Amino acid sequence: MSQRRKHRTGLSRLWSYTEQQRGRALVVMLLATVSAVAPVVGWHIVGDVIDAGIRAGDKQRLTVDVALYVGVNALAWGLGTATWLMLASIGQRMVVALRRSLFEHLTSLSLRYFSEQKAGWIIARLTSDVDALSDVLNQGLTTLVVNTLTLVAAVGGLFWLDWRLGLVALLVLPPGMLVTRWFQRTSHVAFSEVRTRIAAVTAQLAESVSGMAVVQAFNRERAFQREFDGLNDANRQANIRAQKLSSVFFPAIQFLGVVATAAVLFAGARMIDADALEIGTLVAAVGLLTLVFQPLQELSELYGQVQAAAAAMEKISTVLDAERDIVDRPGAKQMKRIDGRLTLDGVVFAYGEEPVIKGLTIDVPAGGCIALVGESGGGKSTTAKLIARFYDPLEGAVLVDDTDLRGVQLRSYRRQLGVVLQDPFLFSGTIADNIRFGRPDASDEEVEAAARAIGVDRVGARFEHGLEHVVREGGAGLSAGERQLISIARALLADPRILILDEATSNIDRPSEILIERAFDTLLQGRTSVIIAHRLATVRRADEILVIESGRIVQRGTEQSLLAEDGPFRRLAHTLEPPAAEQLARRAPVLEPS
């Protein structure tokens, strides 16, 4: 994104989304100009009809003028229709380009951004704010272009008709500018507040829907209703304040039009009495005044909509200008198929000022498996996110096959990475679609093979359509164990070289855990694996177990060697699985103090 675009926050930023349409825009401007000039010419013809045709009794002139009048207005109608259609098309294309740019930028931001922003706030940017711009670009853009050109043409035509009447009409210009400036300053604040309030309502709605089970379980419906009512009322009041400003501004512009018309009629009547003006010229001048104030009134009505869109664009710009934490360095290399040797070399990382990872050093051979265990908040999941390059270390380096991940293209690395999370997310679609998520080009046979290898075929057997059973968003209707099996099959089909299991069995019942543990045996074969878990059954398969506390490795070794020591791992094992820990501790050799 260019620096020039990043410094723009208002509607001028939309100009960058017309790059592919500059030729169409030029054609539209030519059509709109001719369309705007045509009615002005029409009123000049009306003046000539009265003075040179009717009053002079020239029937031939009258016939020619009437024919010209009809032809000019027919031309204006045709060009106006074409202009409206083409401008609406340009506006819609701009909306599509903006939405695409906004979503593309969102997907490139690091997890830090999403952890700092409410989901509802982000959704408001993509929905209500973009909709506010869409309204202006679909209808307002046409109104803006056509009426602006008509206004300019009408003013020019009025002065061309009679400069004295033009000067009389312009007496209302200074108060009109003052009223417009007042509205511009006050409405910008008001409409910005409207965007903020609607975002708060959207955020509360998103949070309520996501946590509805908890809300109902703790009988908090009324409390959430009161909170929603408060936010909704604040949104209503903000809209009322904005509409009050509009209710003053629009009638003021209308009144100025009435004043200008009265002034022109008065001045014109005096000039006719003095034989300094023809009556046809006065009629044409009044007609041209309608062409001045009608578009001016429509533009003033549009102005409130434009202010709302400008406020929405400022909100959208806060997303578009959010810095990407993880970016490819200039000259970053494509990472070819990796062996999978994983190294963390003196890694230090902090979310804020206080480091949560403090000089971590880990070396996992290709195809090896390590387990990270420890109390919550010790830094295990943060370590996994550094390996996945959701974050970059502040000090030290994360290397794969002795290559610093900061020097390779992120996409080429992520294609060889698999992650199985504690709470797997399934997308709306079929079970097969979710398995195929990591490899969209996988064949049905490959999907079925992965499902059989993991045991997902048993899940599909519960439903009439098998793997083609449609899953609701988030995997509703499936048990936690079934969702986890599908996510494991998804990782298996993607065939990653490095695999991260982040608390993948922590929310699973015992029968499901047995199935999942068997699935892990299939999934881990031949892959470099990092397991984050509390259960001994999961970490037991690791070549080495690392106990992490406060961002440091305090113990490392095999399960039996760690249980033989009186240290953090034995205490952790006793807390989580006392019978298994005691049994292994009894079988482990007793180490005498030296």
Image (spheres, rainbow, N blue to C red):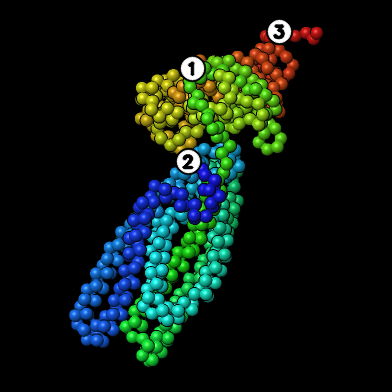
Q: Position of residue 475 (x, y in %)?
A: 47, 34
Tag 1 near tag 3, CB within 8 Å: no
* Of residues 283 and 437, the one drawn nearer to the viewer in this rendering: 283
- Please name the amino acid that badge 3 sits on: Pro
Identify which amino acid the numbered label 1 is placed on: Thr
Residue depicted at 55% across the width and 24% down the height:
500
Residue found at x 41% / y 69%: 151
In the figure, 314 relative to 415: above or below? below
For disc 2, the marked residue is: 104
Q: CA distance from mark 1 to mark 3?
A: 32 Å
Height in image: 467 above or below 158? above
Q: List x then y, in percent, for residue 577.
A: 65, 20
Q: Are marks 2 and 3 in contact (CB under 8 Å)?
A: no
Rounded to the nearest angstrom, the CA distance separating label 2 from label 3 is: 57 Å
Which of the 4 quarters of the picture holds residue 69? bottom left
Query: Please, what is the three-letter code of the amino acid marked with disc 2?
Result: Glu
The mark nearer the N terminus, 2 or 1, is 2
Residue beneath disc 3: 589
Does 173 sit above or below residue 507? below
Residue at the farthest right position: 594
Residue at the image point whose x is 44% and y is 66% from the top: 299
Which badge, 2 or 3, comes first in the chain's sequence?
A: 2
Residue 204 - label:
none
